[in-house]
């Protein structure tokens, strides 16, 4: 069973897993993506839009590659994410 999480977005970002601080989400963009997804529950997000939102100055191909990398990190560093996040090649919910 995956841990139960508490995410604190106001002040300093922090996440607690089963009562213990989780320190694996220390990259600012990883935290920002998680916060964005948590603040928009159940709303399909277009990957192209997210890539442009987080990397507005990069070419689309590079921005989408960065999004894929950050999603991979999120899923490997936060157990149970795959059960809460539905994804295909164009959207995620």
Image (spheres, rainbow, N blue to C red):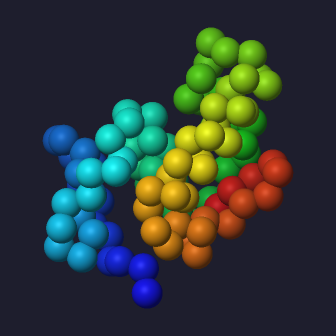
Instruction: Name the foreground residue: 92 vs 78.
Output: 78
Residue 17: percent from left, percent from top? 27, 69
**Given the current orientation, which residue lies at the most extreme right position?**
89
Task: From this view, report whether residue 71 is shown above or below residue 16.
Answer: above
Q: Quadrant of the C terminus?
A: bottom right
Residue furthest top as drawn: 57
- Quadrant, the N terminus: bottom left
As drawn, 25 above or below 57: below
Please tell me whether residue 48 is drawn above or below residue 92 in the rendered image: above
Residue 47 placed where, x, y %? 72, 43
x 39%, y 43%: residue: 31
44 above or below 57? Answer: below
Q: Is residue 36 visible?
A: no
Front in this rendered view, residue 88 or 53 = 88
Q: Residue at x 73, y 45 (%)?
A: 46
Residue 53, horizontal then vertical, whole percent = 59, 29
Q: Residue at x 82, y 51 (%)?
A: 89
Please provide percent x and percent y for residue 52: 66, 27
Q: How many marks?
A: 0
66 left or right, relative to 26: right
Q: Is residue 55 left or right of residue 61?
A: left
* In-image side of 48 versus 23 (left or right): right
Whether residue 45 appears in this view of the structure is: yes
**Residue at x 79% of width, y 25% of height:** 61
């Amino acid at each position: 069973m995956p841990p139960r999480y508490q995410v604190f977005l106001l002040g300093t970002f922090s996440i607690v897993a089963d009562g213990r601080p989780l320190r694996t989400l220390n990259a600012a963009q990883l935290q920002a993506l998680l916060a964005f997804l948590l603040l928009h529950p159940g709303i399909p997000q277009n990957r192209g839009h997210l890539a442009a939102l987080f990397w507005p100055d990069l070419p689309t191909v590079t921005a989408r590659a960065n999004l894929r990398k950050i999603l991979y990190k999120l899923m490997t560093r936060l157990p149970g994410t795959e059960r809460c996040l539905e994804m295909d090649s164009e959207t995620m919910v």
